[in-house]
Amino acid sequence: MVKKIPIGPFHPILEEPEFFELHVDGENVIDIDMTIGWSHRGIEILSESKTWDQVPFLVERVCGICSCSHPYAYVKAVEDLLQVEVPKRAQYIRIITAELERLHSHLLWTGLAGHFIGYNTVFMWCWKYREPLLDILEAVTGNRNHYAMMRIGGVRRDVPPEEYGNIRKMLDKLWEKNDMLTKAIIDDPVIHARLKTVGIFNKDQCRLYGALGPTARAAGYDVDARRDHPIDAYGDLDFDVILCENGDVFDKAVVRQLENFEAIKIIRQCIDRLEEMGPMKDDSELCLEIGEIPPGEGIGVYEAPRGEVLHYIRSNGKNMPMRHKIRAPSFNNILTNEASVPGNTVAAAGLITAAVDPCYSCTERVGRVDVNTGERYVLSEGDLIRLSAEKTEEIRRQLGM
Amino acid sequence: MDAAKYLFSYLIFPGFLFTAVAGLLATWVDRKVTARVHWRVGPPWYQPFADMVKLLGKEVIIPAGARATGFLIAPVVGLAAATLASTILWMANLYPASSFVGDSIVVLYIMTIPAISMIIGASASGNPLGILGAAREMKLIFAYELPLVIVMLTTVYKVGSFSFEEILGYQSANGIMMGSVSGVIAFIVAIFCAQAKCGMVPFDIPEAETELAGGTHIEYSGAPLAVVKLNMGIMFFVVPIFIITMFWGGVSLAGWRILTTILKYVAIVTIMVLIKNTNPRVRIDQAVRFFWGPMLVLSIIAMILAVLGY
């Protein structure tokens, strides 16, 4: 007998709005229905009513955890439009903030995954190790979250040289703790029993669903925007892209754990380079002078902790973006549940949906429901292409091209 | 006069009042130790009592799809059974003369009723997650009862009697059961079964907060939830006492032996809490395989060793 089990409207662990309906036969999941779109906040349209310099503060609020990745992708999009290269010091400071964010995001996920499988000790320990990291972020940027570091043409403030020592010390400690956590995950037989061969998502499916970030890399699908589209100083830095093979939840956890080591390596290199440069002489090392934003369009891509985040902006020469489109990685990754959940048990379903590290609120951009009839539209590929072409025409007309 | 005595035994000491207070204190020990393992501070000692008082004052919500009678009676039945198990167990320990033939079977039987009552309550709640939790609870009972009964039989075989009086008498004359190889193996198996009986990680599968959002408890609120919680507290008190009685020389409140009693109990509770905090929750199929695989084999080995005289 097939029964329907709801997960939602709030995910029991991520406390974010989503709704999954599991079609189960006893403990086995036969099928899954996904409904997202409960948290539409109109970020894009808001962004189109803010000045170019205000938008980074807005897009920081897209997600509380990727609060550096979104502004990073946005400023890269504007810089793509302007065709400018930001000062070296600013590049390293950007990377330090972004990689610190990746560390805290991955630690947060590992903790939540522990909580999900009822291993609250891992949950508490991971979050304890995350604390010094947030302290460093506060020392460097002034905030534990929403760092407000990104600015078109550079960054807002310097990393004070007296903090280099603290950051290094914290990273050394974190390396040790992360090593311990990684070993605990890789060696624990019960964790093996819970995570291995659960929620398998293979390489071909990654291509089909457009999976991104650790979700794709766990299956051996080699994508990493930091290496594929090296922005700022990423091209000069030495780091590896972690790949696993099986694409199950265990591999997703391992990929995230090992990426922490890479992030620590990257930050260490950046600090070294900053130290070589010596103390800052004047503000031109932090940020370029940016005047008017000319008409045109730009794309910014950055590898957020959850995968590639893409920002597209179009300018008509005024003081605010004419169009700002955000594509968060969770938008692709959440859909992978359709392939990875069926065939598993109910006990695993929640875990698999959490294993892509979804960020529902970043993802929610548009829902299309007829208010009079309550009917939901499903747009086919053809419709989307047609809509997109119409929109381009409209913009062309407005620009008088 | 007899009726008054029985009533006192059941309601005050060593029945309901004593067991409830001790059980709630035991849950505090659990919470405090867990908190320290997590690098948290943990609640003050009266927190479980404060929780009870708060829950009793809250509104009771009966879901629209529920069968109210079964839904509300189930926790009370569980509470009555847990209290009765505790009363029989303590009376046999404190006043051996009150023991009767086969009381260990009675206690073992009564101790499954709280779990069965949760199955009834969850099924009556009409919530699909509750029903899933009930199905898991049912499978779990089948899983852990088998090895638990077999390890209990090792003691019974050695003593040659089902009554607590003779089991305790044998242990005070010939040394505790844990002094033998079979006793130690039986004790280990019993601890894992106790873990499942008390609904603690890794066997809190029926409740599974992050999978089923409470499972069997999902629809309970207010006073019925307080009863459910009290039930779990009492089980957390009774099951270790049962194990101590069977394998570790029993409990006593006379003189300095009160201290060894507390030490024994705290030792078992600490082992259980540490298992809870160093393991993730397993899936139900893994739990069944665990109890019918390694645990069953171990319990049979213990039985064979007991028959051979080890």
Image: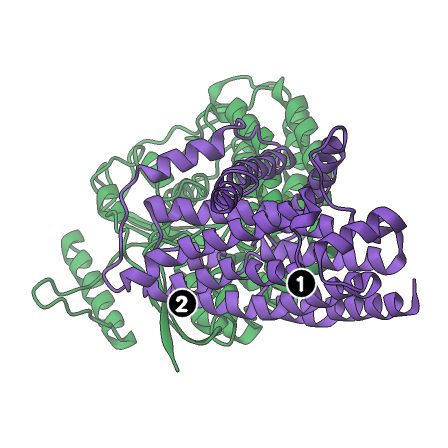
**Image x and y of residue B68, in percent:** 28, 60
Q: Which residue is mark 2?
A: B131
On-image quarter of the N terminus of chain A: bottom left
Does B56 sit left or right of A157 as displayed?
left
Instruction: Pick whichever, A363 or A154, lies toward us.
Output: A363
**What chain does mark 2 sit on?**
B
Question: Residue visible at 47% across and 42% down?
Answer: B4
Helix, strand or loop for disc 1: loop
Q: CA distance from mark 2 to mark 1?
A: 34 Å
Q: Residues within 10 Å of mark 2 (few under 14, many from 20)?
A: many
Q: Tell me the shade of chain B.
A: purple
Vertical position of residue A392 compared to residue B41: above or below: below
The quadrant where residue A392 appears: bottom left
State left or right for residue A288 relative to residue B148.
left
Residue visible at 66% across and 29% down in the picture? A170
Along the viewing direction, whichever of A32 and B6 lies nearer the viewer = B6
Dot 1 surroundings within 10 Å: few (below 14), some, or many (20 or more)?
few
Name the amino acid, label 1.
Gly
Which residue was labeled with disc 1? B102
Label 2 or label 1, whichever comes before in sequence order:
1
Q: A71 or A136, which lies in front?
A: A136
Q: Which chain is green?
A: A
